[in-house]
Image (cartoon, rainbow, N blue to C red):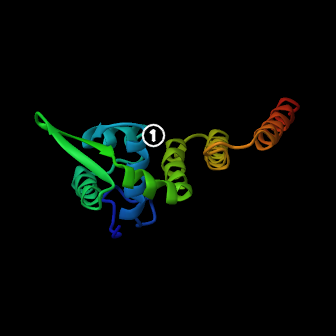
C-alpha cells in the first residue's frame, strides 16, 4: 500500500497520527470483525480513541478504495451506503502484518487516556500494552504451556498490585 498522510488532526508535534499504510492496516483489522460502512469505521475509531483520533471521510474512503483495488476488501452499494468487508486476500495480508496492525490499534486506543490524570494515563497505557502483547502472543492456537505461563505472570502482577 502506498503511504500518505491520514488526514486526521495532528498528534501535537505537527506529525499525523498514522500514515496511510497504518490506517489501511487499522481498517483491515476493523473489517476482520465484520462488515461495516465507512462512516461506521470512522465512528469506531473515534470511540476507540476517546474522540482523540477522528480520521476524515476524505482520507478513509480513498483508503478503502485502495484496499478494494488491491483486492483486500470488497464493497457493495446497499441503498445510499456502501458496505465493506474483508476478502480472503485481505485476511492473508492482515495475518502477515498482524503484529504491526495490533500495534497501530493499541496506539489509537491509548489515545483515550490523553489528558487524563497522571495516575490513569500510565495505567491505561500499560493496560493497552498488555492487551496488545496478549493478542500477539496468544494469537492462533497457543499451546497449553504458553497459556499457563501467561496466566501465572498475570496472577503474579495481580498479587503485587493487591499488596500495594
Instruction: Give me the residue at 33% from left, 60% from top.
Output: 6
Instruction: Give me the residue at 40% from left, 67% from top.
Output: 14
Instruction: Give the quadrant of the C terminus.
Output: top right
Farthest top residue? 162
- In the image, 134 versus 85, the foreground residue is 85
- In the image, 132 versus 57, the foreground residue is 132
Total count of labels:
1
Farthest right residue? 163
Give the residue number, with chain letter if any, for mark 1.
48
Q: Secondary structure at mark 1?
A: helix
Instruction: Give me the residue at 35% from left, 56% from top.
Output: 9
Q: Position of residue 75 (x, y in %)?
A: 22, 46
Instruction: Give me the residue at 30% from left, 51% from top.
Output: 73
Q: Position of residue 140 (x, y in %)?
A: 61, 45
Q: Is residue 49 left or right of residue 76?
A: right
Q: Is residue 120 above or below residue 4?
A: above
Amino acid at each position: 500500500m502506498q503511504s500518505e498522510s491520514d488526514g486526521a488532526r495532528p498528534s501535537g508535534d505537527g506529525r499525523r497520527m498514522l500514515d496511510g499504510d497504518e490506517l489501511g492496516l487499522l481498517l483491515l483489522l476493523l473489517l476482520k470483525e465484520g462488515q461495516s460502512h465507512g462512516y461506521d469505521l470512522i465512528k469506531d475509531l473515534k470511540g476507540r480513541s476517546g474522540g482523540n483520533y477522528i480520521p476524515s471521510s476524505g482520507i478513509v474512503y480513498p483508503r478503502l478504495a485502495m484496499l478494494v483495488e488491491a483486492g483486500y476488501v470488497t464493497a457493495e452499494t446497499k441503498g445510499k451506503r456502501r458496505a465493506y468487508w474483508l476478502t480472503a486476500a485481505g485476511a492473508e495480508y492482515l495475518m502477515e502484518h498482524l503484529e504491526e496492525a495490533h500495534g497501530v490499534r493499541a496506539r489509537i486506543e491509548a489515545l483515550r487516556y490523553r489528558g487524563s490524570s497522571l495516575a490513569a494515563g500510565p495505567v491505561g497505557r500499560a493496560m493497552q500494552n498488555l492487551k496488545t502483547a496478549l493478542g500477539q502472543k496468544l494469537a492462533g492456537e497457543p499451546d497449553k504451556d504458553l497459556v499457563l505461563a501467561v496466566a501465572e505472570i498475570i496472577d503474579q502482577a495481580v498479587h503485587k498490585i493487591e499488596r500495594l
